Image (tube, rainbow, N blue to C red):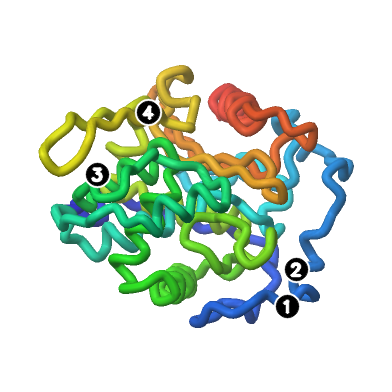
Amino acid sequence: MADGPGRWSGRFIAGGVAIALALVALTVLPADPALAQWAREPADVAVVPAVPGPNVKVLAGELIDLNTGQELWAQDPFRRRPMGSITKVMTALLVLQAGDLNRKIKVSEAAVRYVAKDGASSAGLVAGNVLTTRQLLEAMLVPSGCDAAFLLATAYGPGRPAFIRKMNAEAETLGLKGTHFTSFDGMPYPTEYSTYSTAADLIKLGEQAMRYKLFREIVGQRKHYIAATSQHIAYLWMNTNKLIGTYRGAFGIKTGDTNAAGNCLVFEARRDGVTLIGVVLHADPNANPNAAIDAARTVLNWGFSNN
């Protein structure tokens, strides 16, 4: 049901040498604490904004003009960082590639226990309800439901360990050299830093997912409602990306937030024929819950004004 690739930015980032990683593992193994040492900066680390560029407090970020492929702004774009639920963009991409979006999946007790036990973001799915893959994509991407991600990874692995191996294999295929997954939803398993990416990689991943019409439709919604049927209750999901419906031209794509990741966002907006895609990782060390949204507004305003 997915429409497949519908656009291509032709982006090529010249210059800069990313640190090659030997961590594109095809198995899910406990992280070696020594390998996560790179990410153990204090939360109040001093950040100097890129000059010239928008004045935002982030540990990493990038902004790309999709019309030209030009990098407009960057702050440590190859710095490896945890990114929380932005991880679900890869989960969605694999499900869209697999297809069978009308497949019916029963909400398991295990999925409900998973979000309750770990305090994960939830779509409020009720055990015993039966939803389609498409509906679970809505539940995963709009309210950032880890319960929905749990079900999709289980179904499309099949099994969650197999699904995570597929995530890493796809990262390798896409050339995401600074990316590694140990979870299907960005939850800090087995450590806060074992799932990570870079601003540059996340823009590539975002571009890949946004090629799918269904993905664009889902992440561009301010809310999504599913009426009750004999197979499930009614659900109303609000988009965690508060740019949607409040920032003119915004139409994607995904939030992320954990203690280590801070406030993160991959975003895309179009104005007057110009399309910009960007990412901010660990916006505002003071833990403003809207820090990434505010930073993205600043970056986009700067980008549109200086393009």
**Residue at label 4?**
273
Give the CA separation, mark 2 to mark 1: 7 Å
Residue at image point 45% right, 70% down: 164
**Residue at label 3?**
135
Judge from the rendering whether residue 226 lies leftward or rightward of residue 210; answer left or right: left
Give the structural element (helix, strand or loop) at label 3.
helix
Look at the image and tell me whether residue 61 can be seen.
Answer: no
145 shown above or below 170? above
x and y, in percent, of residue 2 in the image: 20, 53
Q: Nearer the viewer, residue 43 or 302?
A: 43
Snapshot quadrant of residue 188: bottom right
Give the CA separation, mark 3 to mark 4: 31 Å
111 shown above or below 123? below
Residue at image point 11% right, 39% down: 230
Mark found first going from the N terminus, 3 or 4:
3
Whether residues under marks 2 and 1 lie with C-beta atoms below 8 angstroms apart, the answer is yes
Looking at the rendered structure, the kind of residue marked 2 is Ala
Give the CA separation, mark 1 to mark 4: 47 Å
Mark found first going from the N terminus, 2 or 4:
2
**Residue at label 1?**
32
Give the CA separation, mark 1 to mark 3: 37 Å
Q: Nearer the viewer, residue 90 or 229?
A: 229
- Please give the label number shown on residue 67: none
Q: Residues within 10 Å of mark 2 (few under 14, many from 20)?
A: some
